[in-house]
Amino acid sequence: MDTGRQVRNWMTSPALTVGEAALVGDVCAEMERRDLHHMLVTRDGRPCGVVCSCDLSRVPSEAPVSRFMASPLVVVLDGADVDQAAVLLKEACVGCLPVVSESRVIGIITRGDLRRAGALPPLVPSHCEACGGSHHLRVTECDVVLCVHCREEGMADRDFSSEAELGDGD
């Protein structure tokens, strides 16, 4: 195996964590400050879940993040090939994987990291046709690309044919 294609070479390390009792509003502020989309949640110092900024943006800010975390964690070994990580990520329908070595979480690898490694195809189009966002994109029944938030707000009924900007970003 090409060691340059191992997960450890593409992950972000260390993975930032937050305790399960942390409030959604505080976690969202920290994620925005650090320009993060995912953060691991810990219980007694051990990872127990993961939260995504997109999911947290629509929940009560005074609630603990543990109510909205994805759990149990799906993890990948640091020595795994990025292609294996991409398959695991797709099969688990998650946006990131905590990276483990010797039973410890040492980093996190995201969909964007796997795209940069060439293990996932570029996301085309790369932006929501309503708000320009680039996360949690879905294709509607009418082949309009919207983020989950715009889709929930009923933007799928709007005509975007003359407004769409296509690209190959994250």
Image (cartoon, helix red, strand yellow):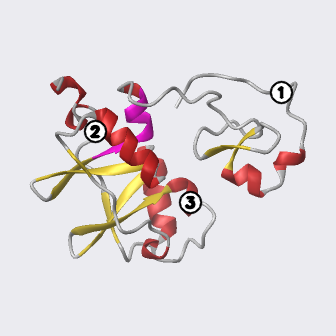
**Residue type, mark 3 in image:** Asp
Instruction: Judge whether 166 appears above or below 58 on screen.
Output: above
Residue 70, position as x, y percentages in the image: 44, 65
Q: Which residue is mark 3?
A: 55
| Residue at mark 2 to residue at mark 3: CA–CA distance | 22 Å
Asked if marks 2 and 1 touch (Cβ < 8 Å), the reply is no
Horizontal placement of 90 versus 9: left or right?
Answer: right
Q: Position of residue 156 (x, y in %)?
A: 83, 47
The N terminus lies in quadrant: top left
Could you say whether the residue bearing mark 3 is in a helix, strand or loop? Answer: helix
Q: Report the Cα–Cα distance between label 2 and label 1.
A: 35 Å
User: Residue at horizontal 44%, vertical 62%?
Assistant: 27
Q: Residues within 10 Å of mark 3 (few under 14, many from 20)?
A: some
Mark earlier in primary sequence (2, 3): 2
Mark 1 falls on what kind of element?
loop
Residue linked to disc 2: 11
The amino acid marked with disc number 2 is Met
Residue under label 1 = 163
Residue closest to the eye, 51 or 63: 51
Q: Amino acid at mark 1?
A: Glu
Q: Position of residue 7 (x, y in %)?
A: 25, 37
Q: Is residue 73 left or right of residue 142?
A: left
Instruction: Tell me: residue 115, above or below residue 52.
Output: above
- Prevailing secondary structure of the magenta residues: helix
Mark found first going from the N terminus, 2 or 1: 2
Magenta segment: does it hold 123?
no
1 or 3: tag closer to the N-terminus: 3
Q: Which residues are magenta?
A: 108-115
Q: Residue at x 89, y 47 (%)?
A: 157
Circle 1/circle 3 CB separation < 8 Å: no
